[in-house]
Amino acid sequence: MTRRITLEPLTQDAFAPFGDVVDPPAPGERVSLSATLRAFDGATQPSLSFTCAAPWALPLQATAMERHNRSSQCFAPMDVARWVVMVAPDAGGKPDAAAIRAFLVRGDQAVNYHVGTWHHPLRALDRPGRFAVLMWTTGVKADDEEWSNLPEPVSIEAA
């Protein structure tokens, strides 16, 4: 059986349990994530990468999620239309499948996942999307990311 969830608009209040939403600053203003960019337990090497995500169409199918227990992870769009973020709280070392949420993200919004937030891999909509990604690593992939299969597939659908 497949569980169906509907995309929600991304707001800071709705996303707060999972991380930060960075809306574009007003002219002359600056937004800083210094309080929530974090690294722990040997993740001392900063990693700033750039990626071009292939476009996907709705509905999206999700069967697994990942998390980073030693680092926050920030996705800053460089050239993207819309994109999707799917997150879940932790439940005993696995994503809480009953509490999965999916958000429709505007192309001018960045997202910073808090340390340990379960999330689905990046999915751009409409056209390819270019992103800058900031996190910290230990240099050992198995220590830096953890994957978990979902108990049933999740279909992410438009509102």
Image (cartoon, rainbow, N blue to C red):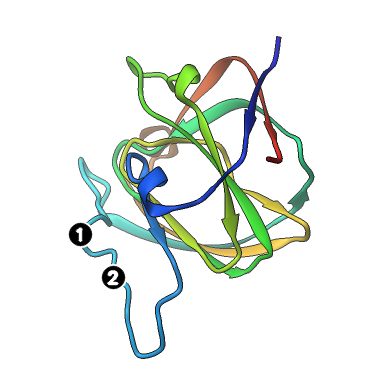
Q: Position of residue 121 (x, y in %)?
A: 58, 41
Question: What amino acid type is highlighted by mark number 2?
Answer: Ser
Residue bearing mark 1: 35
Instruction: Using the image, determine if residue 154 lies above or below residue 25.
Output: above
In the picture as drawn, the residue positioned furthest to the bottom comes out as: 28
Q: At 33% from the left edge and 39% from the top edge, which residue is drawn?
A: 17
Q: In this view, does 157 lie to the left or right of 116?
A: right
Check whether the beta carbons of the residues at disc 1 and disc 2 lie within 8 A of each other: yes
Q: Which mark is residue 32?
A: 2
In the image, 143 versus 14, the foreground residue is: 14
Q: Where is residue 138 in the image (x, y as percent from the top left)?
A: 32, 45
Instruction: Using the image, determine if residue 6 lies above or below residue 105.
Output: above
Can I make out residue 75 in this image?
no
Secondary structure, mark 1, is loop
In the image, 112 versus 59, the foreground residue is: 59
Q: At 68% from the left edge and 40% from the top edge, which residue is drawn?
A: 159
Q: At 32% from the left edge and 36% from the top edge, which residue is drawn?
A: 69
Quadrant where the N terminus lies?
Answer: top right
